[in-house]
Image: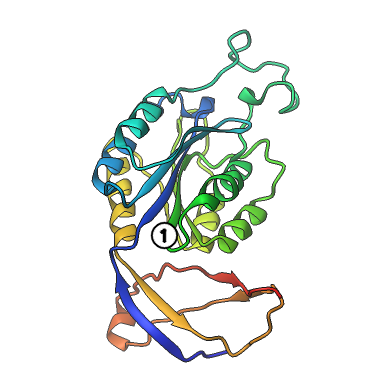
């Protein structure tokens, strides 16, 4: 149903509340040093003292908060420095481990970790801040109890965009591009698949630019039902010259109506 737009403006100064969510399972063994270096450079560029807040969360078969939300860059850098690939000391190859309950270090729970970052970390964010998760993982979930769609729905309900950086050891692990793209595209973020340290740095730079320069489009929906229902959103470019350029619009594709 076409809607009448009541507000359209560029927004660059909104406070940011971010979670850097890092996969520390075995698939990240070779790439984690580059991830840490790029993440620290990203935070140094994007954070504004006393305005923006960031948390660091790592995960294998379960998430672990390494640093709660803070505006202290030294604390965040120390948390990033502490990140390491977690393997059972007495079973580094995770042989004969059949369930996540036996040893969560042998598993990867992406969707559980996105859900926890949304509901247990970003839920504490100031109401008017822009909330986002920057996820670094190969996208191969092996242990979550929460489905991917549940984590997407949770992000939508809490106005959280997920930016995915699909990264891992390509010699041994496949990057699950489809899963990461669906997670990011549906929440208004974007997925990147860097193949080198330079491309990884560029991905962080692009995320920084997009977080700082977005547009707000507002309307009062014609459907006034306060039923908690899921509503679809579709934006299109109508300018013929711009359509020829095949520009891609990134936005939240769904939202949930308030519920009485």
Quick one: quadrant of the C terminus? bottom right
Residue that mark 1 sits on: 130
The location of residue 209, given as percent across then percent down, is 28, 57
Residue 204 lies, with reference to residue 214, above or below; the image says above
Count of numbered tags: 1
Could you tell whether 185 is left or right of 145 in the image? left
The location of residue 53, given as percent across then percent down, is 38, 47
Mark 1 secondary-structure assignment = strand
Using the rendered view, name the quadrant where residue 232 is placed. Answer: bottom right
Quick one: quadrant of the N terminus? bottom right
The location of residue 19, given as percent across then percent down, is 45, 45
Residue shown at 59% from the left, 90% from the top: 222
Residue shown at 50% from the left, 29% from the top: 24
**Direction top: furthest residue:** 90
Residue 172 lies, with reference to residue 4, above or below; the image says above
Q: Camera-side residue: 144 or 63?
A: 63
Colouring scheme applied when the structure was drawn:
rainbow
Could you tell whether 129 is left or right of 112 in the image? left
Number of residues whose C-alpha sits closer than 10 Å to that of mark 1, classed few (under 14), some (14–19) or many (20 or more) = some
Residue shown at 36% from the left, 34% from the top: 76
Residue shown at 45% from the left, 24% from the top: 29
Could you tell whether 157 is left or right of 138 in the image? right
Could you tell whether 231 is left or right of 57 in the image? right
Can residue 196 be seen here?
no
Residue 213 lies, with reference to residue 147, above or below; the image says below
Residue 77 lies, with reference to residue 198, above or below; the image says above
Can residue 113 be seen here?
yes
Using the rendered view, name the quadrant where residue 45 is placed. Answer: top left
The location of residue 87, given as percent across then percent down, is 56, 18
């Amino acid at each position: 149903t076409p809607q009448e737009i009541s507000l359209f403006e560029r927004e660059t100064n909104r406070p940011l509340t971010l979670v850097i969510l890092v996969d520390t399972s075995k698939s990240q063994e070779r790439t984690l040093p580059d991830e840490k270096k790029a993440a620290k450079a990203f935070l140094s560029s994007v954070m504004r003292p006393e305005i923006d807040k960031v948390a660091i969360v790592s995960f294998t078969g379960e998430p672990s908060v390494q640093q709660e939300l803070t505006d202290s860059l030294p604390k965040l850098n120390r948390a990033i420095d502490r990140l390491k690939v977690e393997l059972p000391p007495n079973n580094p190859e995770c042989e004969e481990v059949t369930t996540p309950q036996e040893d969560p270090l042998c598993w990867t729970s992406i969707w559980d970790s996105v859900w926890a970052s949304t509901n247990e970390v970003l839920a504490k964010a100031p109401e008017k801040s822009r909330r986002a998760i920057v996820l670094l993982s190969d996208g191969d979930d092996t242990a979550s109890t929460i489905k991917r769609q549940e984590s997407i729905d949770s992000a939508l309900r809490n106005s959280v965009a997920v930016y995915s950086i699909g990264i891992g050891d390509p010699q041994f692990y496949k990057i699950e591009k489809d899963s990461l793209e669906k997670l990011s595209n549906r929440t208004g973020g974007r997925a990147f698949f860097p193949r080198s340290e330079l491309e990884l740095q560029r991905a962080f730079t692009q995320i920084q630019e997009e977080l700082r320069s977005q547009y707000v489009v507002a309307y009062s929906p014609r459907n006034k039902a306060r039923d908690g229902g899921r509503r679809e959103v579709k934006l299109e470019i109508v300018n013929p010259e711009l359509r020829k350029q095949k520009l891609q619009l990134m936005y939240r594709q769904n939202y949930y109506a308030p519920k009485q």
